[in-house]
Amino acid sequence: MTDSHDPVSRRTFLDLAVSAAAGASLTGAWVAAQSGPSAPSDRIRMALIGSGSRGRSVSSTFVRHHADVQYVAACDAYRMRAEQGVKQLSELQKGAKVDAVEDYRRILDRADVDAVLIATPDHWHCQIVIDALAAGKDIYVEKPLSNTIDRAVQALRAYKGSSRVVQLGTQQRSGLLFQEAAKVVQDGLLGKVTHAVIQFPGSGYGTAPEPDAPVPDGLNWDLFQGPAPRHPFKPSRLRWRGWWDYGGGLITDWGVHLTDVVLWYLEADRVAPLLTSGSAQYVNFVNPDRDQSPDAFSVSWQYPDFVMTFTNAIVNDWEFSRQGNYFIGPGGSLLIHRAGYEFRPSAPPANAAAAASAKPAPQPRRVPWREDDSLDPRSSTSAHARNFLDCVKSRQKPVSELEIGFYATLPTLLAVKAVREGRCFKWDDEQKKAIGV
C-alpha cells in the first residue's frame, strides 16, 4: 500500500537535504568487491523512485539481471503509478514482496536498500541524487541530470564529495554499435573533426492551453511539484517534459543523449562549451505564457576544438534515417543513430598522379542495427544496467558516471537558457557559472 505522509511544502522541501544528511548512517552500502552472478542473498537491493512508464521500463530491464539485483520498493507521488510499479516488479520477481511508497525519503531511510533508480520528472533528479548520496545509496539516474544549471552544479559537488557509484542513463555509451562507430572518429578516418551536427525531430512536447482542474485522487500534487514553482493542477502538467518548470523539451530530453555522443567521440567528456547561443520560435504551437518549450529551435555551441549545433529540423529519408549525430571533418563524415551508422569518406584525389601515390582510400559503408544485445534488443539499456551493477560491486566508476553526465547535460541547459532569455552565454567552468554576453 502507498505510504501516507503530509505533502511537502516549499519550506519543508528546503529542509530535505538536512533531514537526509541526518539519516546518512542508515546506509545499505555494497562493499563486496566482486562481479558477475552471486547468490540470491547477495543481490543488490534496489528501489525504484519514479514509477512512470520509463521507470517501469528501466527497472524491468534491471530485473533481467536477476542473479544480481532485487527490487524491494517502488515509489511515486501518484499512488496509481506506484502500485503499477509494485505489480510489475512483483510479477517479474516471481511474487517477491515489493512495497509501494509515496515519499522518496522513506526509501532512503531503509537499511534494506543498497541502490536507487531515479526516474522522476527532471526537476526532481538532483535533489533526490543529493539526498541519496547523503544516505549512502548508489544511484542510477535517468537523463538529463537536471532541468536547471544550479541544481546540476549542486549534484556534481555532492557527488565529488562522496564515494558512491552514480550512473546517468545515457545508455548509448554501452551500445556495441555506438562503440564501433566511435572508432571511425577516434581512429582518425574523418581527420580532425570541425563540426558535430545534431539533428533530431520533434515538436518540443508542448501542450495546448487548458483550464485548471481538480487534483486526481491519489496524486500528491505538492510532492510532485517539489522544488519547482507552485501552480494549480492541470492534466497536461503530468506530461511534464515540455514544461520549463519540470523539463527542457526536446533540447534536454533527447539532446543529452546526442551531446553525450559528441563529447564521447571527440574525447571531450569533461569539457564545457566556451559559448552557447540559440534561437527558437512558436510556429505551430500556441503558448502565450511562454512556459513551455517551442516547436522550432536551432542552438549552437563553441568548444575549444570544434563547433556543435542542434536543430529539430531533419530531411526525411525512408531508406536510412537522417536523424542523429553527424561528425564532419576533412576526411569525410559519419552519421550515427540507433538504427545504424553511415560513413562517407571525402572524394578520392582529383588527378591520376596524386591518386597513384595516395594510400588506399577508406570506402563508404553503411552498417545497420543488428541484434548485439540479446537481453534487450534494439536497446543498450541492459548493458548499461549491467555496467552499473558491476560497478556497485567492484566500486569502479561506470561508463556514464555523474561528472560525465554533468558535462553532457550542461550544453543543453545552457541552450535552454539562451533560448528563454534571448542572449548568448559564456561558461566559467572554475566557478561553474553561466555569464550572459
Image: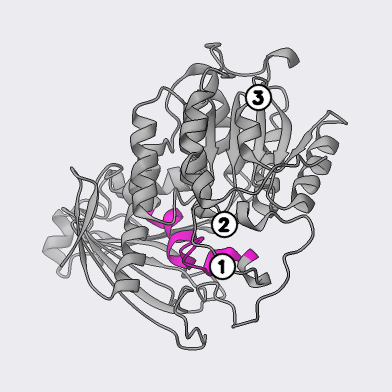
Name the residue that disc number 3 marks: 110
Q: Residue at x 53, y 44 (%)?
A: 12
256 is higher (above) or lower (below) than 134: below
Q: Amino acid at mark 3?
A: Arg
* Quadrant assignment for the C terminus: bottom left
* Quadrant assignment for the N terminus: top right
Q: Please tell me whether mark 3 sits on a helix, a strand or a loop.
A: loop
Disc 1 vs disc 2: Cβ atoms closer than 8 Å? yes
Residue 98: x, y in percent? 79, 33
Name the residue that disc number 1 marks: 231
395 is higher (above) or lower (below) than 375: above
**Residue 245 drawn in magenta:** yes
**Residue 421 drawn in magenta:** no
Mark 1 or mark 2, earlier in chain: 2
Q: Amino acid at mark 2?
A: Gln
**Magenta region:** 238-259
Q: Nearer the viewer, residue 95 or 20?
A: 20
Determine the residue located farthest toward the front in the rendered image: 11
Name the residue that disc number 2 marks: 225
